[in-house]
Amino acid sequence: MRIAVLKELAAGETRVAATPETVKKFIGLGAELAVETGAGVQASISDSDYSAAGAKVGSRADVLKGANIILGIQGPDPKDLSGFADGAWLAAGLNPFGERARVDEYARLGIEALAMEFMPRITRAQSMDILSSQANLAGYKAVLLAANAYGRAFPMMMTAAGTVSAARAFIMGVGVAGLQAIATARRLGAQVSATDVRSATKEQIISLGAKPIFVESVAGIEGEGAGGYATEMSEEYQKAQAELVSAHIAKQDIVITTALIPGRPAPRLISDAQLATMRTGSVIVDMAAESGGNVEGSVSGETKRIHGVTVIGAKNIAALMPADTSALFSRNLFNFLSAFWDKEAGRPILDEEIGNAVRLTQGGKVVHDRLVGQN
């Protein structure tokens, strides 16, 4: 069983899909590890570190030759893949909806593509969930980005020259990233409030010492879809939420937006009119900028000044902390493959529940039910 670890070629991608730690663990299962030269450099992992762990380091062509499993952070360009074994698996974040043509090409090449972001949110798959592991650190980093752009201090400071008021931070969307953002903003000394369409998150917000901001007038709307993901709300709820947010956001110094809906554009949470009500010098970090943005006017990868508000269109925040995010991502991959490792077969054999959830292609066809019939 040969496992290939590729160097990421996407612009701005600094992470790597295996570390010396997971290399050793895969070898312990009986696998042969091959790592592309320079794959871990930006994550502070040298080629010699991989060699010392027992991996073979070489060119992409050498690494892919006879590979049974290919590991990546982002899905590689099919044009850069050749020489792998028939029916090889590709396990990575594949962005199936945004890169549908690439998925079709994987099928044509005979690759069994496994989208790690489709991992079901069930108890036994928690350790395999790349969305959660990467969002956790991204939520932390988003607050630091805001703090760096904010021209004032976060905590209240009492000095002989007078008192500096604490910053007010508002977290919109209380998933994994949002919860970490709340905790980080609190550690930095801000007065923190948060909101979410899922009423069940209210207790989580309170437990972290933040103030929950929720629509109370619209009953019976939970906002939680299958697997714990948020769903789109009714027009009635959206109107009530917009009114509540408009009144609250005008008083905030820092806003972190995290709302995403799998397979759909990010919901619009802050309009241009709402931006205009915020105080000059306020900062917004739009963590959903790559999916269309929660904030009107935000652009992925750009920092803009709109009505005196600094709007940071966050792009691949996880790549800003490659050493830690690579460590977590690589453990997710190991936990996934090792959980199904068959010692007699010398390879992983996926079960139906998780296999069907993550498998996009098989036998030369696109087989995932969320993609079949779509262009």
Image (tube, rainbow, N blue to C red):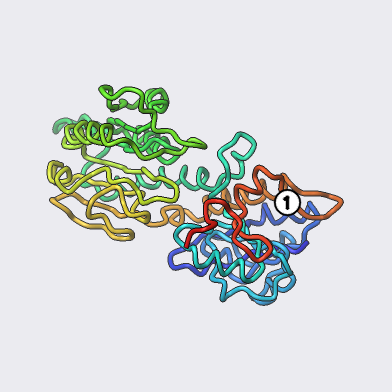
Label 1: how many Cα within 10 Å (few below 14, some 14–19, many 20+): some
Q: Is mark 1 on a helix, strand or loop?
A: helix
> Which residue: 59% across, 57% down?
360
Residue found at the far right of this picture: 344
Q: Is residue 195 above or below residue 317?
A: above
Is 233 on the left-hand or right-hand side of 357?
A: left
> Which residue: 57% across, 70% down?
105
On the image, which quarter does residue 191 sit in?
top left
Residue 240 vs residue 317, the one in the foreground: 240
Residue 168 vs residue 64, the one in the foreground: 64
Q: Position of residue 315 (x, y in %)?
A: 38, 57
Is 203 on the left-hand or right-hand side of 126?
A: left
> Which residue: 55% across, 54% down?
326
* Image quadrant in which the N terminus is located: bottom right
Label 1: which residue?
25
Q: How many labels does the image show?
A: 1
Q: Residue 337: in sight, yes or no? A: yes
Q: Residue 49: in sight, yes or no? A: no
Residue 323 vs residue 29, the one in the foreground: 29
Q: Which amino acid does label 1 sit on?
A: Lys
Q: Where is residue 264 in the image (x, y as percent from the top left)?
A: 40, 50
Q: Position of residue 96 (x, y in %)?
A: 50, 58
Q: Position of residue 316 (x, y in %)?
A: 42, 56
Q: In this view, does 193 lie above or below 64?
A: above
On the image, which quarter does residue 372 sit in?
bottom right
